[in-house]
Image: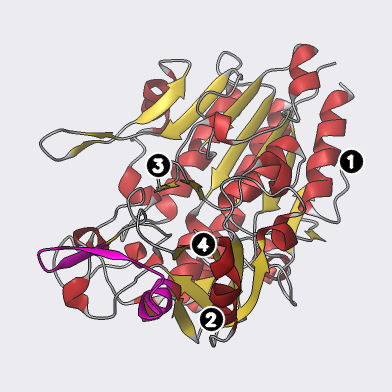
Amino acid sequence: MQRRMVVVEVAGLGAKTCRGAALSGFQWRAARPVFPALTCPVQATMRTALPPARHGMVFNGAFDARLRKVFFWDQSSALVSGSRIWRAFREQGGTVGMLFWQQSLGEEIEMILSPAPIHKHHGGMIDTCYCRPSQLYQRLNGAVGRPFRLRDYWGPTASRRSSEWITAALEILLRRHDLRTDLIFAYLPHLDYAFQRYGPAAQRSGEAIGELAGMLERIRKAAEAAGYDYLFFGDYAFEEVPSGPVLVNHVLRTAGYFSIRRVGRHTYPDFHAARAFAVTDHQIAHVYVREKAARKGVASLLSGLSGVAQVLSAEEAFGGNPPNSCGELVAVASKGYWFAYPWWVDPAEAPDYASHVDIHNKPGYDPCELFFGRFPWRISQDPGRVRGSHGRTEGEGLDVGWTSSADLLGYTLLELAGSLRDWLGRC
């Protein structure tokens, strides 16, 4: 008999959060996270049962040294190297679907649903999703009763409505024999918004946890009714960041490593001329150093900063053969800190995209996009408003939580991915 499983990744679900009363209806277990504890590296590990050093996703983007260009949130599945955990499952007739997982476009599976807005030439955006089969998104919109909105998924208005839509879509898929696949991966994001805005211990975050509990219970009931097992897991654990951000690129600029290009009053990074620059991603920064002789000086400079716990070589961070997209150095924030991308402190120097949601052009993840600014339809440029972050894996309270109706094992997320692969292979 064909095994069936729904796998739900819950953004920001740490083991400590799972021990609260709101989620007491599940039997949670703890697992050590993947380093770095970021969305894309974790998702790549869960679909390959490989560490980041082997699947190649070492942050939520990539840097192309030939183009001298930073890419964030690109969706090609070719960015993830390695055999998928469902290969044997599909060879035995199993079908696979992915809902709202990064780097899913191009996967050799039966069902894909991923946000894919069309940016119009003269401004504006067509809010839509990429889907396989071709009518899947339209059919789910009709069944859910409303379309999925990108503004609910990211930006100042991001909210539980994104997770609610995905939960409702999952319930529908599990009921519909003509739509569902045997293995379904899905993603619930809204806890992540609350934890970044308010911190994981805030009352508003507690409300988000309560909402999550209701969604997981709905998915569990729908899975059981359809004859599916379930796996719910967290990708990383949040911590409070009262000490604020470390402006790594501003430090590199002051020291003469980071180069800028002035366009009017704005400044932009010049990666063609820069001797060193950092691509920041929550509590991790990949530092690209053009000259080998400069690495020691850059490492010494950053190691001396308040808020920097470690500055590792690529080999120390990811083993003897690090992926090409990895920085020559990898900085890890101290507890209570995170890394912000700005190379400026004078607001007059900020590039035009600093005040907008622009996840693809900024050379670093920007949690300020979760907050409105002083003027309508502008985002905040005050990184001090950020209350929670993640990415570190060393220290107390950083384990993630997971629970499953299947006979799975996992003291680490890497082991859990391997256990899921083996479970699927026993069909």
* For discs 1 and 4, the disc positioned in front in the rendered view: 4
User: Which residue in the protein does label 3 denote?
Assistant: 67
Q: Earlier in the sequence, mark 1 or mark 4?
A: 4
Q: Earlier in the sequence, mark 3 or mark 1?
A: 3
On the image, which quarter does residue 377 sit in? Answer: bottom left
Q: Secondary structure at mark 1?
A: loop
- Up-down relation of residue 128 to residue 246 (above or below): above
Residue 370 position, x and y percent, is 35, 63
Q: CA distance from mark 1 to mark 4?
A: 46 Å
Residue 327 position, x and y percent, is 57, 57
User: Which residue in the protein does label 2 denote?
Assistant: 301
- Up-down relation of residue 121 to residue 157 (above or below): above
Q: CA distance from mark 2 to mark 1?
A: 49 Å
Q: Earlier in the sequence, mark 3 or mark 2?
A: 3
CB within 8 Å, label 2 to label 1: no
User: Which residue in the protein does label 4 denote?
Assistant: 289
Q: Could you tell me if residue 283 is visible in this image?
A: no
For the residue pair 253 and 367, the one nearer the viewer reads as 253
Q: Could you tell me the amino acid type at mark 2?
A: Leu
Disc 1 packing (10 Å; few <14; some 14–19; many ≥20) = few
User: Which residue in the protein does label 1 denote?
Assistant: 407
Q: Earlier in the sequence, mark 2 or mark 4?
A: 4
Q: CA distance from mark 2 to mark 4?
A: 13 Å
Q: Secondary structure at mark 4?
A: strand
Q: Could you tell me the amino acid type at mark 4?
A: Val
Residue 149 position, x and y percent, is 33, 42
At x 28%, y 80%, the residue is 345
- Up-down relation of residue 135 to residue 321 (above or below): above
Q: Which residues are magenta?
A: 249-268
Residue 231 position, x and y percent, is 73, 43
Q: Could you tell me the amino acid type at mark 1?
A: Asp
Q: Could you tell me the amino acid type at mark 3?
A: Leu
